[in-house]
Image: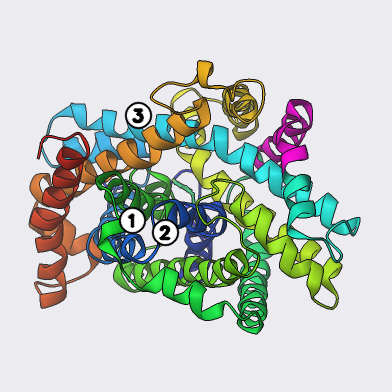
Amino acid sequence: MSQLRESIHGQWSSRWIFVLAATGSAVGLGNIWKFPYITGENGGGAFVLIYLLCIAVIGIPIMMAEIMLGRRGRRSPINTMRHLAAEEGRSPLWQYLGWAGVLAGVLILSYYSVIAGWSLAYVARAVSGVFEGATADAVGLVFSDLVSDPERLLAWHTIFMVMTMVVVARGVKGGLEKAVSYLMPALFVLLIILVGYAMSTDHFVDGLSFLFTPDFSKLTTDGVLIAMGHAFFTLSLGMGAIMVYGSYLPEHTSIAKTTFMVAGADTLVALLAGMAIFPIVFANGLEPASGPGLVFQTLPIAFGQMPGGTFFASLFFVLLVFAAWSSAISLIEPLVAWLVENKNMTRIMASVWAGMGTWLLGIGTVLSFNVLSGKEYQLFDKTFFDLLDYLTANIMLPLGGLLIAVFAVWQMRKQSSMDELEMSNTTGYQLWRFLLQYITPIAVVLVFLRAIGVI
Ligand code: PFF
């Protein structure tokens, strides 16, 4: 069967642009908003250790597999899976893996956009100087005022969704990558400044030891599932986002090297965010397990106390918005690419339709923090937002990743993967194969079984 040498959607102009785009997808709210609060809720060190382990033995090999499948298929994930299954003489049912990914992307983006909206709102708050010298209580109040107002949340969610769709409509390979190439390093520098500030509090060591001293008595089975799910979420794996980016990757670029760069940068950003946030939590007597508001209730305290705080706070939330923006476009790209390929839509129409559907679903999350936050509206003790987050990050992504692994090493011929990875039968290749053949599937299945109480 003939191979497309290039995707109909075009390709990245260089490997470096791909690394930036994939890092842009990986580094986002997951690192700065989600990682700290789920670490706080799950007791710290032991949770972090499991998360790091999952990145190393599950995340990295799956990221390589996703990029490889994308580049070989050169189409949207749905059509890539269909094409590759045919090429390898496998069941056409594999295309449903692409569909599951599209669904996961839409579900995630629906709430991701609402949280990105909080970040936008915080840009406005920071610029107006409300955090200057603010106490922990005052900062907490700014947050609760925001999330208790559904109209405001809806407005910010709408603005963020429109921003996302504008970039997607113009093509992912357009302007944003250039912006990201400056803004990501800037975010990194700002996080280092924040860690510097955290060092000046007398609780830096408490923060570090919370993050890095494992105490397994604090880790529940659900915590293990959440840590694994987060490894997928933070690396944008298991739903085709990295696959679709891989489909725009030029030939002859080392998939292994690029994967290490992306995963390394992503992990570093998350750890820095944790190191900035927890000392502030302890220095101000806040609760590490206070939930999704954690970053919004801690970092502004630090900004409020440092010289030039208003400027740094504004800059930080602007950068957070950019980080979220470059992740959001990758969540919807698999659907948009499919609409263009199969429904003959222009990118603009495809973005409008995909964006409207996702926006509508996001209203459920908007209401989860106010009108529908009460116990009577919860299922299994979870709001609509909690359920969506749990279902996607902890179930859909690991399941998607597991199937990607199965396809890459059990369904594809060995020669095909060696060709596409441009690796010969070296130790590196064999290790990759071994991890995906045995370790990934067994680990994912064991964690699932344990989470549902079977073992
Ligand atoms: N990796 C992004 C983050 O950490 O914020 C979120 C994300 C993007 C998840 C794309 C999944 C995805 F496909």
Amino acid on which the number 3 mark rests in the picture: Trp
Q: Amino acid at mark 1?
A: Ile
Kindly report the secondary structure that dominates the magenta region of the rendered protein.
helix
Residue for point 27% across, 38% down? 81
Badges 2 and 1: C-beta atoms under 8 Å apart?
yes
Q: Earlier in the sequence, mark 2 or mark 3?
A: 3
Residue 67's label in the rendered image is 1
Foreground residue among 237 and 275: 275
Q: CA distance from mark 2 to mark 3?
A: 22 Å
Q: Position of residue 96 (x, y in %)?
A: 27, 28
59 in relation to 92, above or below: below
Image location (x, y in percent) of residue 213: 35, 73
Tell me the element at label 1.
helix
Residue sitting at x 64%, y 82%: 196
Residue carrying label 3: 99
Kindly give the residue lying farthest to the front in the view shown.
285
Q: How is the image coloured?
A: rainbow
Q: Quadrant of residue 187?
A: bottom right
| Residue wearing tag 2 | 249
- Name the image quarter holding the C terminus: top left
Measure how far apart labels 2 and 1 are at the Cα level: 8 Å
Left or right: residue 343 compared with residue 410: right
Residues 242 and 36: in front is 36
Q: Which residues are magenta?
A: 144-166
